Image (cartoon, rainbow, N blue to C red):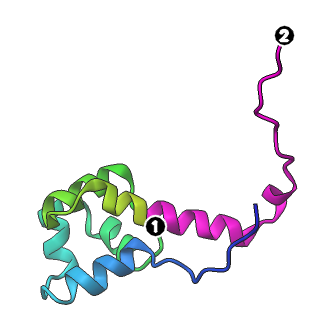
Amino acid sequence: MRRQKHREPAHPGRILREYYIKPLNLTITKLAETLSVSIKALSAIVNEKKRVTPDMALRLAMAFGKTPEFWWNLQNNYDLYLAQQRSTEWQKIPKINMELSSV
C-alpha cells in the first residue's frame, strides 16, 4: 500500500462552523441547547479540539437533516489521515497471503 498524498481532510468541526453555524447565524450556545449538549463539548468540536462521537453524529444529523454517517465519515477520514501522517510503522506490516491452499 502506497501512502497517498492528499490534502488534509477538514475536521468536522470546521465543516460545522463554516457551512452551518456561520451561514445560519447560530451561536454555540443556541446550537448546544438545541443539541442538548454542553457548550464546552460543542465548542471543543467547533474549535477542532475534540472528535465527533457517534452520539454527536446522531444529534447533528437530526438537527441539520444529514445522515449520522455524513458526520461520522468526516471524523473517520480526518482521523485516518492524521494516523497516516503521524506514523510510518503501519507501512512495515507484511501482507498476509489470503489464498486458501488445497488440502
Screen quadrant of the C terminus: top right
Is residue 36 among the parts visible in the rendering? no
Left or right of 34? Residue 95 is right
Residue drawn at the location 40% of the way across and 80% of the way down: 47
Question: Picture quarter containing residue 51?
Answer: bottom left
Q: Amino acid at mark 1?
A: Lys
Image location (x, y in percent) of residue 16 = 29, 76
Question: Picture quarter containing residue 2?
Answer: bottom right
Q: Amino acid at mark 2?
A: Val
Q: Residue furthest front?
A: 102
Residue 50 vertical position relative to residue 97 in the rendered view, above or below: below
- Within 10 Å of disc 2 (Cα), the crowding (few <14, some 14-19, many 20+) is few
Residue drawn at the location 81% of the way across and 65% of the way down: 88
- Depth check: give the residue in front, 7 or 102: 102
Residue drawn at the location 33% of the way across and 55% of the way down: 69
Q: Secondary structure at mark 1?
A: loop
- Within 10 Å of disc 1 (Cα), the crowding (few <14, some 14-19, many 20+) is some
Residues drawn in magenta: 75-103
Q: Which residue is tagged 1?
A: 50
Image location (x, y in percent) of residue 81 = 60, 69
Residue 60 vertical position relative to residue 22 in the rendered view, above or below: above
Image location (x, y in percent) of residue 95 = 82, 45
In magenta segment, residue 42: no
Q: Which residue is tagged 2?
A: 103
Image location (x, y in percent) of residue 34 = 12, 64
Residue 47 vertical position relative to residue 81 in the rendered view, above or below: below
- Depth check: give the residue in front, 15 or 45: 15
